[in-house]
Amino acid sequence: MNEQIIARHWLPLIAPKAAPVLATSTVLILARIWNANGAEHSVGNAVLMAALSLAAGAAGVFASVGYAGDKVIAGTAFAASGALAFTGIAGYADGLSLPLLLWVLATVAAYGLAARYWRTDRRTTVAHERHTAERRAEHAHIERVTAIEAGAQIETARAGAAYAEQLATALLTRAALPGFNPQALAEAGLPQLPATDQEAA
């Protein structure tokens, strides 16, 4: 079967790969803007961000334990906890060396976590494509076998029709011959043709 080839745009392909660095860069930029607007060496802001980070981490722990644990909620909570901690430190610290170091570490960690999900998604996609290809090959084989069987039946029917037509032509030709006598054939011991319905009548 001919399938339509779809050329995908480069932006949807590269967007998931750029999401971790965009997220960490956005947090760094917002933290430095917050730093420039009064968060530098502000103990109250640091305590607030630490409390929010601990609360998000605790929510992640509670979401990941037990039989009803949800990996998506737990991962989101832990990511929020890390982002809040990163924001608090980047907003509290003076200078760019520590925030940039934390940005590099956060970006590497984000890509490490994302790579795991990308591999899982890739395996799922490859397995689905393989299963689809196997099903298509199986259906194509069944279609070929069915077409061959149908062709054989058609050829058999044609051969039978041709034989019947030739037999009828031979019988008509024999009956039209001058001097043909079915009684003489019967007396000679040759097999007699079965009587038709008209002869029986």
Image (cartoon, rainbow, N blue to C red):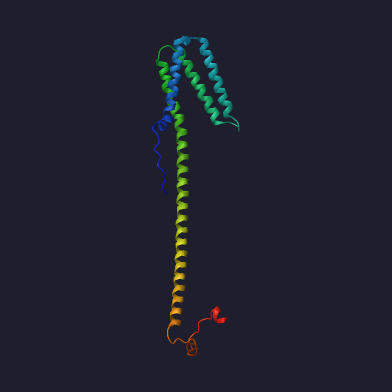
Q: Position of residue 59 (x, y in %)?
A: 57, 24
> In the orientation shown, which residue stands out farthest toward the bottom?
187
Q: Is residue 164 above or below residue 36?
A: below
Q: Position of residue 168 (x, y in %)?
A: 46, 76
* Figure disc tally: 0
Quarter of the image with the C terminus is bottom right
Q: Is residue 100 above or below residue 1?
A: above
Q: Is residue 74 above or below residue 167?
A: above
Instruction: From the viewer's perspective, tell me whether residue 201 is left or right of residue 191.
Output: right
Foreground: 187 or 10? Answer: 187
Q: At x 50% / y 19%, what residue is drawn?
A: 84
Foreground: 84 or 67? Answer: 84
Q: At x 55% / y 28%, what residue is drawn?
A: 73
Q: Position of residue 42 (x, y in %)?
A: 49, 9
Q: Name the quadrant containing residue 155.
A: bottom left
Foreground: 155 or 42? Answer: 155
Q: Position of residue 146 (x, y in %)?
A: 47, 58
Q: At x 43% / y 80%, what residue is drawn?
A: 173
Q: Name the quadrant containing residue 26.
A: top left
Q: At x 47% / y 52%, what residue is drawn?
A: 139
Instruction: From the viewer's perspective, tell me whether residue 59 is left or right of residue 144.
Output: right
